[in-house]
Image (cartoon, rainbow, N blue to C red):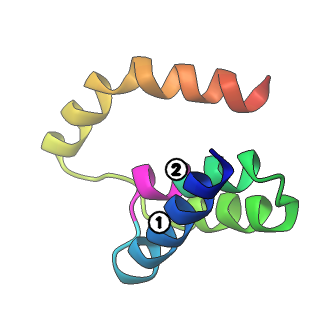
Protein backbone atom coordinates (compact mmCIF):
# COMPACT_ATOMS: atom_id res chain seq x y z
CA UNK A 1 0.00 0.00 0.00
CA UNK A 2 2.79 2.46 0.81
CA UNK A 3 4.27 1.88 -2.64
CA UNK A 4 1.04 3.16 -4.13
CA UNK A 5 1.23 6.38 -2.13
CA UNK A 6 4.79 6.97 -3.32
CA UNK A 7 3.82 6.38 -6.95
CA UNK A 8 0.77 8.59 -6.60
CA UNK A 9 2.87 11.34 -5.02
CA UNK A 10 5.23 11.28 -8.01
CA UNK A 11 2.31 11.58 -10.42
CA UNK A 12 0.76 14.45 -8.46
CA UNK A 13 4.14 16.22 -8.25
CA UNK A 14 4.32 16.19 -12.05
CA UNK A 15 0.79 17.52 -12.36
CA UNK A 16 1.47 20.28 -9.87
CA UNK A 17 4.58 21.37 -11.77
CA UNK A 18 2.78 21.46 -15.12
CA UNK A 19 -0.70 22.66 -14.21
CA UNK A 20 -1.38 23.20 -10.49
CA UNK A 21 -4.94 22.62 -9.32
CA UNK A 22 -6.68 22.15 -5.99
CA UNK A 23 -7.58 18.49 -6.38
CA UNK A 24 -4.07 17.38 -7.34
CA UNK A 25 -2.53 19.58 -4.67
CA UNK A 26 -4.74 18.15 -1.97
CA UNK A 27 -4.12 14.59 -3.13
CA UNK A 28 -0.38 15.24 -3.09
CA UNK A 29 -0.66 16.59 0.45
CA UNK A 30 -2.59 13.47 1.54
CA UNK A 31 -0.02 11.16 -0.07
CA UNK A 32 2.80 12.87 1.80
CA UNK A 33 0.79 12.72 5.02
CA UNK A 34 0.19 8.98 4.56
CA UNK A 35 3.92 8.50 3.95
CA UNK A 36 4.70 10.50 7.14
CA UNK A 37 6.78 13.00 5.17
CA UNK A 38 6.14 16.05 7.31
CA UNK A 39 8.28 18.59 5.48
CA UNK A 40 6.83 17.62 2.11
CA UNK A 41 3.32 17.72 3.58
CA UNK A 42 3.91 21.27 4.80
CA UNK A 43 5.34 22.34 1.44
CA UNK A 44 2.39 20.77 -0.40
CA UNK A 45 0.02 22.70 1.87
CA UNK A 46 1.91 25.92 1.27
CA UNK A 47 1.87 25.33 -2.49
CA UNK A 48 -1.84 24.58 -2.32
CA UNK A 49 -2.45 27.99 -0.76
CA UNK A 50 -0.62 29.67 -3.66
CA UNK A 51 -3.10 28.41 -6.27
CA UNK A 52 -5.40 31.27 -7.36
CA UNK A 53 -8.99 31.13 -6.17
CA UNK A 54 -11.80 30.25 -8.57
CA UNK A 55 -13.25 33.29 -10.24
CA UNK A 56 -15.97 32.40 -12.75
CA UNK A 57 -19.60 31.58 -11.96
CA UNK A 58 -19.19 28.16 -13.56
CA UNK A 59 -16.23 27.37 -11.30
CA UNK A 60 -18.24 28.56 -8.30
CA UNK A 61 -21.14 26.25 -9.15
CA UNK A 62 -18.73 23.31 -9.45
CA UNK A 63 -17.16 24.18 -6.09
CA UNK A 64 -20.59 24.30 -4.44
CA UNK A 65 -21.35 20.80 -5.73
CA UNK A 66 -18.06 19.56 -4.28
CA UNK A 67 -18.58 21.22 -0.90
CA UNK A 68 -19.56 18.02 0.89
CA UNK A 69 -16.38 16.29 -0.33
CA UNK A 70 -14.28 19.23 0.79
CA UNK A 71 -15.90 19.20 4.24
CA UNK A 72 -15.07 15.53 4.60
CA UNK A 73 -11.43 16.07 3.58
CA UNK A 74 -11.02 19.07 5.89
CA UNK A 75 -12.43 17.02 8.75
CA UNK A 76 -9.93 14.28 7.96
CA UNK A 77 -6.98 16.67 7.88
CA UNK A 78 -7.96 18.57 11.01
CA UNK A 79 -8.66 15.39 12.90
Q: Is residue 7 magenta?
A: no
Residue that lies at the very extreme toward the left in this rendered image: 58
> Dot 1: few (<14), some (14–19), or many (≥20) neighbours within 10 Å?
many
- Give the x, y percent position of residue 4: 55, 53
Look at the numbered disc 1 and give the secondary structure of its residue. helix
- Give the x, y percent position of residue 74: 62, 29
Q: Which residue is drawn at the image coordinates 31% and 34% (left, top)?
A: 63
Left or right of 42: which side holds 6? left
Indicate the quadrant containing the N terminus: top left, top right, bottom left or bottom right.
top right
> Dot 2: few (<14), some (14–19), or many (≥20) neighbours within 10 Å?
some
Task: Please tell me whether residue 71 is drawn above or below residue 62 in the rendered image.
Answer: above
Q: CA distance from mark 2 to mark 1?
A: 7 Å
- Pick the residue in front: 55 or 39: 39
Left or right of 33: which side holds 21? left
- Pick the residue in front: 43 or 37: 37
- Pick the residue in front: 11 or 49: 11
Indicate the quadrant containing the C terminus: top left, top right, bottom left or bottom right.
top right
The span picked out in magenta is 21-26
- Give the x, y percent position of residue 46: 69, 64
Q: Which residue is drawn at the image coordinates 67% and 50% (left, top)?
A: 2
Mark 2 sits on what residue? 27
Q: Which residue is drawn at the image coordinates 22% and 34% (left, top)?
A: 62
Task: Please tell me whether residue 11 is drawn above or below residue 77 in the rendered image.
Answer: below
Q: Which mark is residue 12?
A: 1
2 and 1 marks in contact (CB < 8 Å): yes
- Give the x, y percent position of residue 53: 41, 55
By secondary structure, the bulk of the magenta-drawn segment is best described as: helix
Amino acid sequence: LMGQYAEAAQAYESIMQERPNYRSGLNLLLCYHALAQRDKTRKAFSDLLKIPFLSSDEDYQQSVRNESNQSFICGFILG
